[in-house]
Image (cartoon, rainbow, N blue to C red):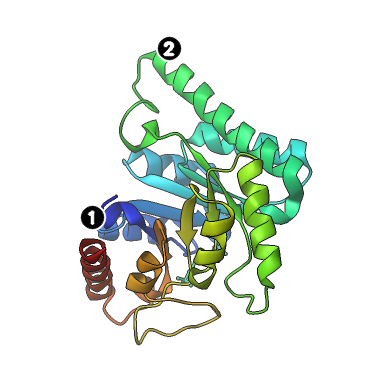
Amino acid sequence: MTARERLALALDVPDRAAAMALVERFASDFGVMKVGLELFTAEGPALVRDIVAAGNRVFLDIKLHDIPNTVEQAARRAGELGVWLLTLHTQGGPDMLAAGARGLREGAASARRGAAAEGSGAGGAGPNADAPIALGVTVLTSDADAPPEVLKERALLAQRAGCGGLVCAAPDLPAVSAAAPGLLRVVPGIRPAGAAQADQRRVATPAAAIAAGADVLVIGRAVTAAPDPDAAAAAIVAEVTAELGAS
Ligand code: C5P
């Protein structure tokens, strides 16, 4: 994976205009655009569809946690939208995680069949052709006191339930990689040296996270709230590229 493919930009903004401005400005550096609770609540699936249609991989970070049937149907709708990554909360348990992973897979497959039948090609090319991946959220990176046993348990739970990846903090990478190898490891709480920590408690620099085994880095305020966002993004790309070259 290239540096760009490993970088997800958190679109933590209140509306479509602000989100699309970030997508256009940073799509050359960030291969994944993350739509979280704030933006999804404000703009809903139409915006997700538009970001996908513009050729971006989308990470829908809405941390689903409900009864299995509800999560399955919500995940199915996410799959139909063409998202690449979708978060499910591991606290929801094995049945809920399995239902979510299944719904996501089936939703994407049905959208592809529909697009093929229409001959539109939508959902069958570019980033939309990737099989979607359900990510189990282990422990929030703002939580400083998560015990290590919980982390391993949740990583294993996600793997057994059919999730293709995990969200974890950088310091947790060795433990989750050992407990559940082979999953895509998505890591928020990334702070370049000197950047403000804000509400994140378990942080790492981009290079340290890659060195510890992160596959995809989620980056928000370190770019969007930087005094010079373009320079901050360029520095992160350079740091990740150098680390990939070194490893
Ligand atoms: O601005 P910052 O880089 O801290 O943003 C991190 C992003 O990653 C936010 O959108 C947050 O919701 C998300 N996230 C997180 N911790 C998790 C899962 C997602 O911080 N465990």
User: Residue at position x 63%, y 33% from top?
Assistant: 103
The picture places residue 180, in percent across and down from the top left corner, at 57, 52
Does mark 2 have its CB less than 8 Å from ligand 1? Answer: no
Instruction: Write down the quadrant of residue 151 in the picture.
Output: bottom right
**97 versus 185 height, above or below:** above
Disc 1 marks which amino acid?
Ser
The picture places residue 75, in percent across and down from the top left corner, at 62, 38
Q: Is 77 or 15 nearer to us in this picture?
A: 77
Q: Secondary structure at mark 2?
A: helix
User: Residue at position x 47%, y 57% from top?
Assistant: 186
Extreme residue toward the top, this view: 117
Q: Secondary structure at mark 1?
A: loop
User: Residue at position x 32%, y 71% from top?
Assistant: 207
Gap in Å between the C-alphas at discs 1 and 2?
A: 32 Å
Q: Is residue 1 left or right of residue 46?
A: left
Checking the image for residue 117, the label placed there is: 2
Q: Is 183 or 230 nearer to us in this picture?
A: 183
Q: Is residue 179 left or right of residue 111?
A: right
Q: Is residue 8 left or right of residue 28?
A: right
Assess disc 1: are there few (<14), some (14-19) or many (≥20) residues with their C-alpha within 10 Å of its C-alpha.
few
The picture places residue 234, in percent across and down from the top left corner, at 22, 69
Assess disc 2: are there few (<14), some (14-19) or many (≥20) residues with their C-alpha within 10 Å of its C-alpha.
few
Q: Which residue is disc 1 drawn over?
A: 28
Disc 2 marks which amino acid?
Ala
